[in-house]
Image: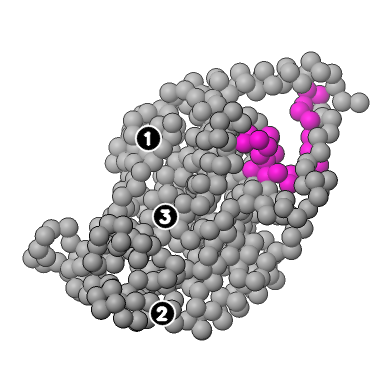
Amino acid sequence: MLRFLTAGESHGQALVITVDGMPAGLDLDIDALNAQLRRRQGGYGRGRRMAIESDRAEILSGVRKGRTTGAPIAMLIRNRDWVNWQQTMHVEREMPDGATGTRRADVTRPRPGHADLAGVVKYGHDDVRDVLERASARETASRVAAGSLARQLLGRFGVRIASHVSVIGDVMLPADRVVSFDEAAAIPDDAPLRCADESLQQQMIKYIDAARDAGDTVGGAFEVIATGVPTGLGSYVQWDRKLDGRLGQALLCIHAIKAVGIGIGPEVAIRPGSRVHDEILPPRREAGPPVRPTNRAGGLEGGVTNGEDVRVTGFMKPISTLMNPLRSTDLTTMTEAPAAIERSDVCAVPAAAVVGEAMVAFVLADAFLEKFGGDSVDEIERHYAATAEQVRRRFAARGTPA
């Protein structure tokens, strides 16, 4: 099993990540890992925090001479803003001598839409900061780091992952506009919103600007596309092994993601079956598999990958910190008061797309190891090659295309 755990607060000393189950012998590209962390920090509509942080992962264990050893991999991402928060976020019971920054007052006015109120009730806190520091989307930097390792494992076997932003507010790509993997992969990392349609991207920017001027926030949607995914990952035999369910959970656990679609997503509820299901046609090459003229299923049928691109869409709600705050209640006086304001973004959909890529990569890598597993990359390669040959022989025995 491939798994990871994270620790750390938004304004604490650092984020900590432990990845367990990574096979031995994988050559790691640390620069590529840090490039993914930089991608998460980009996108139009981000707040001032992104100008402060410059995330880099330090690998502490599980890697030697650039290769994984099979042991748990521990990583650290330092928070550069810690210097401004030592008087508020110190671990010691009493503020240590020399602590820097400013002592901030307790947060007592929970934000609608955030974990603030539910968290203080659940854990019995008086200061909402004890909740919001961990519930912050700052934690997603950890997921991108873990997902980058999974991404590099998948890349060894020809699986590639990209994403694009399809919706910002009420500005969206047409329902029949299918963005190919190559289109998504070709979008520059410095594109403001990583939308495949430049003219639409400019409309999205104007929408974000209007929200900023009003002290409001906006959400949207992004699609993650994985190509080169082999057939047979996941299973239909038990509910918790269905890969679409695992992908759905992986995206829904990202901060502010409230819905997930696979393939054409919610469209399946309003289209007739003839415009939902992907026809199966004879192979176009010798010993090849049957082909699909469409991929409305998003590469998954019955919880199992079918050889087509895996396509997963995440739907993100607007961020809950508004500069023109909604009404709330001060928990010390139980009287009406405006919700607290924390430094935040107007729109973080492009960043969420990068986090989505990381989570999809991690789930696919876990399913990949489940199917082709081994303790080392060399062992996995033998299992993968043997399975590919078995599939080739299966279709070769059925004759050649007319």
Residue holding disc 1: 20
Residue with the most extreme bottom position? 213
| Labelled pair 3, 1 in contact (Cβ < 8 Å) | no
**Label of residue 399 in the image:** none
Is tag 3's residue or tag 1's residue first in the polypeptide sequence?
1
- Checking the image for residue 140, the label placed there is 3
Q: Residue at point 50% right, 47% down? A: 250
**Does any portion of residue 188 appear in the rendered image?**
no
- Report whether 292 appears left or right of 338: right
Mark 1 or mark 2: which is in front?
2
Residue projecting furthest to the right: 402
Going from the N terminus, do you reach mark 1 or mark 2 first?
1
- Would you place residue 14 above or below residue 279 in this image? below
**In the depicted structure, whether residue 162 falls above or below residue 112:** above
Residues rendered magenta in the picture: 286-310
Quadrant the N terminus occupies:
top left
The kind of residue on which mark 3 rests is Thr
Q: Which residue is mark 2?
A: 327
Q: Sequence-wise, which precedes: disc 2 or disc 3?
A: 3
Q: For the point 57% across and 56% down, which residue is it?
A: 259
Residue at 34%, 82% (x, y): give it: 337
Where is residue 49 shown, x and y percent of the image? 38, 68
Q: Is residue 104 left or right of residue 186?
A: left
Residue 32 in percent (x, y) is at 47, 47
C-alpha distance separating marks 2 and 3 = 28 Å
Q: Quadrant of the C terminus?
A: top right
